[in-house]
Image (spheres, coloured by chain):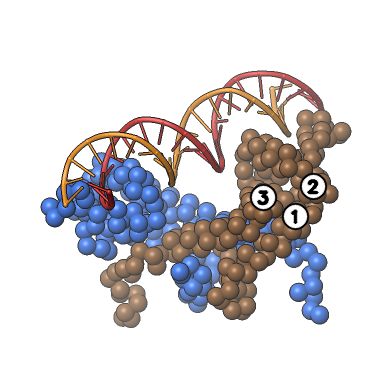
Chain colours: A blue, B brown, C orange, D red
Amino acid sequence: MGSVSTDPNPTADPREVLAYLLKHANLKLTALMDAALEPLGIDGKDFGALRVLAHREPSSQLQVAQTLGIDRTTMVALLDVLERKGIVTRRPDPADRRRNVVELTEQGMRTYEAAQVAYGKAESAFLAAISPAATDQFRQTLRTLVEK
Amino acid sequence: MGSVSTDPNPTADPREVLAYLLKHANLKLTALMDAALEPLGIDGKDFGALRVLAHREPSSQLQVAQTLGIDRTTMVALLDVLERKGIVTRRPDPADRRRNVVELTEQGMRTYEAAQVAYGKAESAFLAAISPAATDQFRQTLRTLVEK
DNA sequence: TATTGTTATACTCTATAACTATA
DNA sequence: TATAGTTATAGAGTATAACAATA
């Protein structure tokens, strides 16, 4: 028997547990991201919505909410803020007036582009301590773990 | 110029962003962990407190709270629940009666051991799609990213 | 005066239920 | 009847401020 599998105390340091490491890695990147986006007047959650809106045909609120995995009532408040800031517009879909077509404004597109740059810097700072190869591996592993 | 660095649209899929992947990996492991611990009457947050308590000398509430990175008022509510379940005890520290000495009970130690087994299964399920080597690499990367 | 634990309170985030309008 | 968006409300989770006991 090897010492690894018979270790009587595999979690002697509470901070070695994967759940702890993953949680704190997420907290750290989120903090870096929010700090980087703050000068643009948005946070990571807003940036997530912008990413969805920037890469799809003009969508209904419900479609965006479902893509983000948030409730449609939460979507209302999120878009209220972005609309007030001039980042998105809402208008009834002529083909189905129950739906709102949500689009990035010109200013919203500029904000989104600036946000991509700012986010990229935050991500780079987060990954600074590991090699490009380790970064690729890390990203690939996360993709596998998250999928389905 | 390589196509990678000149990709005009590096985040065409909103779900390829590291912040998204990390967040959802964390959500997935947290869900698996909470489901695995639920029969024991605790959740991942409680398990975190138990890990700290099991691997330290009997601690004051404040020490445990600071190790977990939570507010001391939050610690009160967390321990209220664990104490009511017979998992921990609180008593004034004879050396400094402002402090509470917090300890796992006998039952608490059994709960903790069962929780370790349950958590281990959740972690294994989470990691099932990647190889042991990739798992080791993943863990090491997270350690590096989280540290300091 | 400062510190630990506690309580009361408030704030953030998000979801559920009910309502309006459209289909 | 069912669906999209909205509003009102409630719940979980956590933090701030004030207080009691102790140092």
Tally of marks: 3
* Residue designated by label 1: B112
SS type, badge 3: loop
Q: How would you rate the neighbour count of disc 3 (Cα within 10 Å): few for under 14, some for 14-19, many for 20 or more?
A: many
Q: Quadrant of residue B92?
A: top right
Is residue A140 or residue B25 the one in the foreground?
B25
Q: How would you rate the neighbour count of disc 2 (Cα within 10 Å): few for under 14, some for 14-19, many for 20 or more?
A: many
Indicate the chain on which mark 3 is placed. Answer: B
Tell if the residue under mark 1 belongs to the same chain as the one under mark 2: yes
Q: How would you rate the neighbour count of disc 1 (Cα within 10 Å): few for under 14, some for 14-19, many for 20 or more?
A: many
Alpha carbon separation for disc pair 1 and 2 = 9 Å
* Residue designated by label 3: B42
Question: What kind of residue is marked 3?
Answer: Ile
Compared across the picture, whether B23 is left or right of A102 comes to right
Do callouts 1 and 2 mark residues in contact (Cβ within 8 Å)?
A: yes
Question: What kind of residue is marked 1?
Answer: Tyr
Q: Position of residue A114 (x, y in %)?
A: 30, 56
Tell if the residue under mark 3 belongs to the same chain as the one under mark 1: yes
Alpha carbon separation for disc pair 2 and 3 = 14 Å
Instruction: State which tag comes first along the sequence, 3 or 1.
Output: 3
Is B59 above or below relative to A51? Answer: above
* Residue designated by label 2: B104
From the image, which quarter does the N terminus of chain A lie in? bottom right
Q: Residue at x 44, y 60 (%)?
A: B19
SS type, badge 2: strand
Q: Position of residue C2 (x, y in %)?
A: 70, 28
Q: Residue at x 74, y 65 (%)?
A: A10
Compared across the picture, whether B90 is left or right of B137 comes to right
